[in-house]
Every structure is written in structure tokens, then in C-alpha cells.
Image (tube, grey):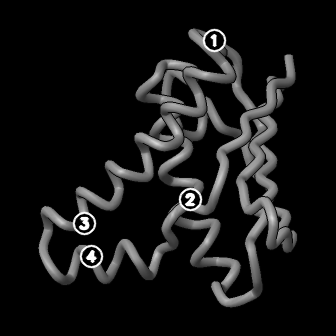
């Protein structure tokens, strides 16, 4: 099985999250929660109540509006938020080694339509 999830807009990056955590632990939690909720909404709208029992390989396509943010900052926090949301919505049972066998990041510029596209493949 192969499914695709599209998250419109851009998620906060790792630097945003670290800055929020250094300001106040509750502010850091709020940033993570806000981003997770955006992903959860996209999951329910596009995947419904899908459940994947087998291990998966995930391919991320990050469409940024420009080149201002470092690639590792964009993808590291984004992957964490997306995978946690997939577990919270029970699309995936867990996000450990037995459940996610690997992932790949690809980066593109799309000033008119920034987004994240995630392809989840059962292996």
C-alpha cells in the first residue's frame, strides 16, 4: 500500500521550536502542539481512519517558499511533528525502528504553494 499526505503551508522549523523552548517550556509545547494539530487535521481530511500495521518507508517532499531556512532545520522538526501526529491518529502504531524503517527528504522551491508532501509506503 502507498498513501500520500499533503500538508498545506510550511511547518515551523527546529530553530523556532528551540527558541520557544528556551523562552518557556510551555511555549515550546505550544509550538509543537500547534504544528501537530495542523498535521492531524490534514491526516483526518485525507487519510480518514486509515491504519497501517506493516513497517513503512517515508518520503518527504518539502516545498519551501524560498531558500531562507536551512534544510536540516526544516526537515528535522517537521519529521518529528508529522510522525508523532501519525502515531496520535493511529495511522501508525508507533514511530520506532520496527515501524519506520527509513525516510528520505527532498527539497523544492514553490513560492506560490508551500507545502509538505509525505508518501508512506508499506514494506
Label 4 Cα neighbours within 10 Å, binned few <14 / some 14-19 / many ≥20: some
Frontmost residue, 104 versus 34: 34
Mark with earlier residue (4, 3)? 4
Disc 2 target residue:
78
Disc 1 target residue:
50
Mark with earlier residue (2, 4)? 4
Tell whether label 4 touches label 2 (CB within 8 Å).
no
Tell whether label 1 touches label 2 (CB within 8 Å).
no
What is the x, y in percent for residue 63? 79, 64
Residue at (67% x, 90% y) in the render: 68
Label 1 Cα neighbours within 10 Å, binned few <14 / some 14-19 / many ≥20: some
Disc 3 target residue:
28
Q: Is residue 15 positioned above or below 123 on the image?
A: below
The image quarter containing residue 114 is bottom right
Tell whether label 3 touches label 1 (CB within 8 Å).
no
Q: Is residue 80 positioned above or below 50 on the image?
A: below
Residue at (35% x, 56% y) in the render: 32
SS category of the residue bearing label 3:
helix
Disc 4 target residue:
20
Tell whether label 3 touches label 4 (CB within 8 Å).
yes
Mark with earlier residue (2, 1)? 1
Mark with earlier residue (3, 2)? 3
SS category of the residue bearing label 4:
helix
Residue at (23% x, 74% y) in the render: 21
Q: Quote the CA–CA distance across marks 4 and 3.
A: 5 Å
Tell whether label 2 touches label 3 (CB within 8 Å).
no
Picture disc at residue 38: none
Amino acid at each position: 500500500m502507498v498513501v500520500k499526505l499533503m500538508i498545506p503551508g510550511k511547518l515551523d522549523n527546529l530553530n523556532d521550536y528551540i527558541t520557544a523552548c528556551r523562552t518557556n517550556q510551555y511555549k515550546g509545547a505550544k509550538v509543537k502542539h500547534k504544528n501537530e494539530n495542523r498535521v492531524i487535521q490534514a491526516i483526518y481530511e485525507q487519510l480518514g481512519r486509515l491504519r497501517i500495521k506493516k513497517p513503512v518507508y517515508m518520503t518527504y517532499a518539502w516545498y519551501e517558499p524560498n531558500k531562507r531556512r536551512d534544510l536540516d532545520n526544516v526537515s528535522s522538526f517537521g519529521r518529528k511533528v508529522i510522525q508523532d501526529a501519525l502515531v496520535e491518529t493511529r495511522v501508525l502504531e508507533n514511530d520506532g525502528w520496527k515501524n519506520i524503517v527509513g525516510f528520505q527528504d527532498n527539497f523544492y522551491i514553490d513560492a506560490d504553494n508551500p507545502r509538505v508532501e509525505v508518501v508512506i509506503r508499506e514494506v
